[in-house]
Amino acid sequence: MALDTEKIIADLKEASILELNDLVKAIEEEFGVSAAAPVAAAGAAAGAAEEKSEFDVELTDPGAGKVKVIKAVKDITGLGLKDAKGLVDGAPSVIKEGVAKEEAEEIQAKLEEVGAKVTLK
């Protein structure tokens, strides 16, 4: 038994909304599926992508004023001088992870002020 796709589409075009709703319910019951699940999951994923609330601040290039950048990293992170220097020397490196957008932008501004290049991820 071969499906006549064109006939099925023509029948669907002529059906009322109520009939289509009944058809969807019958298909869900017969095959144990839900028509709403994929739509809800896709909507939730799209919402999460739009409203990113946590950012990682990455130092991509310390620039010419490396000493000033080391001091700024030390102040921002609370690390010791040696550890801050290690982060700056190892660029690109993440300075802070999971910070709010406002804090990430403040850190970015402080580092760019002393000549560093920063990326928010």
Image: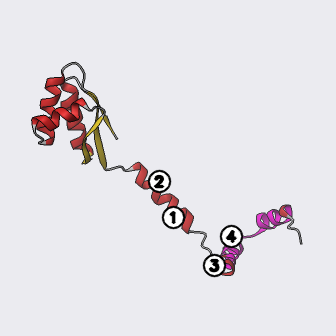
Where's residue 32, x and y in %?
63, 78
* Image point (18%, 23%), residue name: 66
First-in-chain label (4 vs 3): 4
Residue wearing tag 1: 40
Label 2, residues with CA under 10 Å away: few <14, some 14-19, many ≥20: few
Element type at mark 4: helix
Q: Main secondary structure of the magenta part?
A: helix
Q: Amino acid at mark 4?
A: Ile
Q: How many marks?
A: 4
First-in-chain label (3 vs 2): 3
Distance from Cα at disc 4 to Cα at disc 3: 22 Å
Element type at mark 3: loop
Is residue 49 within the magenta segment?
Answer: no
Distance from Cα at disc 4 to Cα at disc 1: 21 Å
In screen coordinates, is 34 left or right of 5?
Answer: left
First-in-chain label (1 vs 2): 1
In screen coordinates, is 22 left or right of 87?
Answer: right
Where's residue 78, x and y in %?
11, 42
Element type at mark 1: helix
Q: Amino acid at mark 1?
A: Ala
Distance from Cα at disc 1 to Cα at disc 2: 10 Å
Which quadrant is the N terminus positioned in? bottom right
**Quadrant location of residue 80?**
top left
First-in-chain label (4 vs 2): 4
> Are circles 1 and 2 on residues that touch, CB within 8 Å?
no
Residue wearing tag 4: 17
Is residue 18 within the magenta segment?
Answer: yes
Q: Nearer the viewer, mark 1 or mark 3?
A: 3
